Image (cartoon, grey):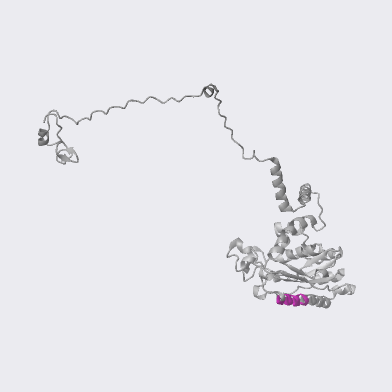
Amino acid sequence: MEGAEVIPIGTRGRPGRGTGQRPSAAARGLAGKAAKGPAQRPPRPKKAAEPPVVQAVPEEAAEAPVSAAVVRERSPMAGIPVSDWQAALEGAAREVLGTDWEQQLARLLAFLRRRVTGDYVVDDYGFDAELTQRFLLATLRPIAEKWFRIEVRGTENIPADGGALVVSNHSGTIPVDGLMTMVSIHDHTGRFLRPLGADLVFRMPFVSSLARKAGATLACSEDAERMLRGGELVGVWPEGFKGIGKPYSERYKLQRFGRGGFVSAALRTGVPIIPLSVVGAEEIYPLVGNVPSLARILGVPYLPITPFFPLLGPLGLVPLPSKWIIEFGEPIRTDDYDAGAADDPMLVFNVTDQVRETIQQTLYSLLMQRPSVFR
């Protein structure tokens, strides 16, 4: 058995008794002298390399010169013709500005140029008619038409020209009813309403400037009489903060109309008084609470709490889409009174009470006609 390979007995294919160390003496005795080291396998014969396959190349292809490939990056805008860009811009302008978009765009650019150069006109009170019509009323119009769906009645009672005093109820926690009245009057009569605002409005930094440009002025007898004599359509809300700050449980119940200063101004100038009743503003921000201590710290008449504010944060400032009805009553003439009628307190009180009762009864009638709060 010479030349045979003897595998010692061990563990895991290794010599020894399972210790993984040197093989035992018995195992070494069984191994022949020639079996030193592991057996080597004979080398596997290498395959003869096959000759490479050579394909014949046509003579024309072999003689043709090979040109280097040039890779150019294509711009995403390079493939769009200028005419397509022009058509797209015209289509967008037509969608935004209407079919007469060229005239609208020209007017817009002219308006911006006048704003930049300062070539625009304001009156003695700071009223900017162009800015009010093109910016303020244009911004408020979709809210009046789409959100509140305002129904306007009795616009034939508003004189086409000359001075007149519009007296309205006040409600809504935030004076949105005044803004909606401005839009409704301008859209149905073409006239601008000149509101008389509280002094708080003109103490607020940004609101003060915007209110002046929109035609508002301080609610004082001097400015009111001057505007009425100048043929302006003046608006007043005698309830003031007591009207817009009253709780929801007292909705559509008119508060006191002050001392009748607006009646005195109308009597001195001889202009008609037009009662205005607004239904729908009470529901946009239902006032369920107030924080008077914090309101005094902030310097405001009240700090409202509604079912959605401040619970929902800024989302609670979105007004509820209530259905609005605005009705202008028959004018109350003041030119039949004597010259000194404005100084008679009893007469002023009686006319004030007449205006208040007219608005209150109209509110009750409109509430009966409205099917529900939101339609």
Residue 326: image quadrant is bottom right
Q: 159 or 13, which is in the foreground?
A: 13
Residue 198 in view in this figure = no
* Quadrant into which the C terminus falls: bottom right
Q: 353 or 321, which is in the foreground?
A: 321
Q: Residue at x 72, y 50 (%)?
A: 93
Image side of residue 13 versus residue 213, left or right:
left
Residue 86: image quadrant is top right
Image side of residue 336 versus residue 357, left or right:
right
Q: Residue at x 68, y 74 (%)?
A: 371
Q: Position of residue 366 (x, y in %)?
A: 73, 75
Q: Position of residue 181 (x, y in %)?
A: 75, 66
Q: Position of residue 250 (x, y in %)?
A: 67, 75
Q: 190 or 87, which is in the foreground?
A: 87
38 drawn magenta: no
361 drawn magenta: yes
Residue 320: image quadrant is bottom right
Number of on-image labels = 0
Q: Residue at x 14, y 40 (%)?
A: 17
Magenta range: 357-368
Q: 74 or 26, which is in the foreground?
A: 74
Assign the magenta stretch its main secondary structure. helix
Q: Position of residue 356 (x, y in %)?
A: 77, 75
* Quadrant into which the N terminus falls: top left
Q: From what the image shows, is residue 212 above or below residue 39?
A: below
Image side of residue 102 versus residue 19, left or right:
right
Residue 369 in view in this figure = yes
